[in-house]
Image (cartoon, helix red, strand yellow):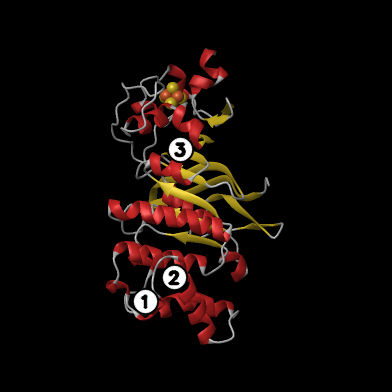
Amino acid sequence: MNEELIIADNLKVYFPIRRGIFLQTIGYVKAVDGINLTVMKNQDLSIVGESGSGKTTLGKAIVGLIRPTKGNVFYMFNNKNFDMSQNLPIEIRQSVQMIFQDPFSSLNPRLKIIDTLKEALEIRNIFKSRNDIIDYLGDLLQKVGLKREYLYRYPHEFSGGQRQRISIVRAISMKPKVIVLDEPTSSLDVSVQSQVLNLLQDIKREYDLTYIFITHNISVAKYMGQKIAVMYLGKIVEINEADNLINAPLHPYTKLLLSAVIEVQSEHVEKELKIGEPPSPVNIPSGCRFRNRCPFAMEICERTEPELIEHENALVACHLYSDLKNKP
Ligand code: SF4
């Protein structure tokens, strides 16, 4: 069913840079700089980009952890539209969860797992007794391959992979509809990463979840998302079905990301693209923000910022695909 779940509407998140004894604002880090995005129910979206692209900030704005500077994130819950930056009832707020890269950061090291996990459940007041909560959480621990008795251990007693499984329990215990996952496997051993990704796929099917999966790894993005959005310096530069984006990338930056992945080689990947360094999000270039790294840059790329436009069922922000390139 084609049901809109999350809509980002011209979303901007700027962080002020302050200097001097009066902490005057001398500029802004434009972490998210005008993003329009729609996530459909059960159509997982991967957001891929280098570090500093703004993808984590975008994820936090989606779940309401960061208030947008401009624009909105709307969330469709029980056929009603809610603005995630507003004060919302707890059951709505908790139905959009986030899992972080470092599972340790979301677990209080001084609390046993049971005490961390039951905290949010008690606010909802939906369980009759502490024993009901313990039963519920014990069942969830078993679902993610851990033992019930682990409820009585402390976070430091677990491996990184086990801690991330506990973070998954913490998220699904809220009965969410959407989970934003921010690089949930990148801090784990390679041998554990695929186990956690497979577990996430199983959990998603069982609990009818929609994932927004943030990663720097385009292969993981393909595995976890039906669609992929490519982000560069606060903007989305390309969105397409995952297979199409991998096999026929349009934006030069998408091609660059793909050229860095040895196992994904196709005739569309231009070998002459160089990785280079992204510019600072404080001093974003005029026109196309990718132009300093782009081998196809034209005069118009310096003057005019490309809009995200439709091209062959994809959305792409590049003058190579716009009519403007032929205009003086
Ligand atoms: Fe390259 Fe120009 Fe396209 Fe930007 S708009 S990616 S500089 S061709």
- Report the disc number at residue 150: 1
Residue 278 vs 76, above or below: the answer is above
**Residue type, numbered disc 2:** Gln
Which of the marked residues, 3 or 1, is nearer the chain's N terminus? 1
Residue at numbered disc 2: 142
Residue found at x 58% / y 63% = 95
Q: Earlier in the sequence, mark 2 or mark 3?
A: 2
Above or below 166: residue 302: above
Asked if labels 3 and 2 touch by Cβ distance under 8 angstroms, the answer is no
Ligand 1 near label 2 (Cβ, under 8 Å)?
A: no
From the viewer's perspective, tell me whether residue 263 is left or right of residue 243: left
Q: Distance between the residues labelled 2 and 1?
A: 10 Å
257 relative to 230 in the view: left or right:
left
Amino acid type at circle 3 is Val
Q: Which of marks 2 and 1 is in front?
A: 2
Snapshot quadrant of residue 307: top right
**SS class of the residue under badge 2?**
helix
Give the percent coordinates (x, y) of residue 255. 39, 28
Between the residue at mark 2 and the residue at mark 3, the CA separation in whole angstroms equals 35 Å
